[in-house]
Amino acid sequence: MLCVTGARDAVSREKHRNAQVHVEFLLPRMPEQKGQLRANSGVYLMNCYELQVLDSLDNPTYADGIAGALYGFAPPLVNASRPAGEWQSYDILFSAPACNAAGEVEKPASATVVHNGVLVQWNTVMAKKGGGCQQANPCEAGPLRLQDHSGFPRAPRTEMRFRNIWLRHLR
């Protein structure tokens, strides 16, 4: 799947809560760009919690904005990025917020993430909704969303490639 700047986010029809997710992505080479302008995308779990996709090899930016970061929550334990132009993967175990009968969050969402075979997030808690959250109620199921970063100020033309995307519902 090819996502070019301006194409809009790719959003699944199927919704999920607790899930095991696999995504492979290919970052374009963009040596003229720096920081968040270099091959920026994201994998949104439940349409609310972003796992950052970014060319993070020799590309300084803020800690929770690099590849493998749960954006706005936690930087990765290590930078496991490969060079742009090589396929990379995320394997994610996501636990949705636990809610009571009144629809109030009793236990926040959390995620464990393996990036290119390396553990980068270990049961990381996300105590609030993420900044790019498009899910009104975190107690309801939401779709998987792959971000088109065209809304970012001065977003350059970016051609993100995704393949072998799957999601398995967990209880």
Image: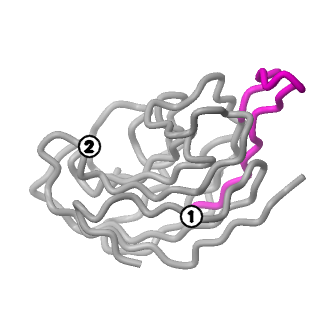
Describe the element under mark 1 as helix, strand or loop: strand
Describe the element under mark 2 as helix, strand or loop: helix
Spot occupied by residue 134 in the image (x, y as percentages of width and height): 50, 40
Name the image quarter holding residue 124: top right
Q: Are marks 2 and 1 in contact (CB under 8 Å)?
A: no
Q: Residue at x 53, y 38 (%)?
A: 70
Spot occupied by residue 114 in the image (x, y as percentages of width and height): 64, 55
Left or right: 24 in relation to 122: left
Of marks 2 and 1, which one's residue comes earlier in the chain? Answer: 1
Which stretch appears magenta? 90-109
User: Where is mark 2, residue-wise?
Assistant: 36
Residue type at tag 1: Ser
Most extreme residue toward the front is 102
User: Where is mark 1, residue-wise?
Assistant: 12
Q: Is residue 122 above or below residue 130?
A: below
Q: Residues within 10 Å of mark 2 (few under 14, many from 20)?
A: many
Spot occupied by residue 24 in the image (x, y as percentages of width and height): 52, 71
Q: Is residue 102 visible?
A: yes
Is residue 105 or residue 67 the one in the foreground? 105
Q: Is residue 57 above or below residue 151?
A: below
Residue 166 is one of the magenta-drawn residues: no
Q: Residue at x 72, y 54 (%)?
A: 16
Q: Residues within 10 Å of mark 1 (few under 14, many from 20)?
A: some
Q: Residue at x 41, y 31 (%)?
A: 63
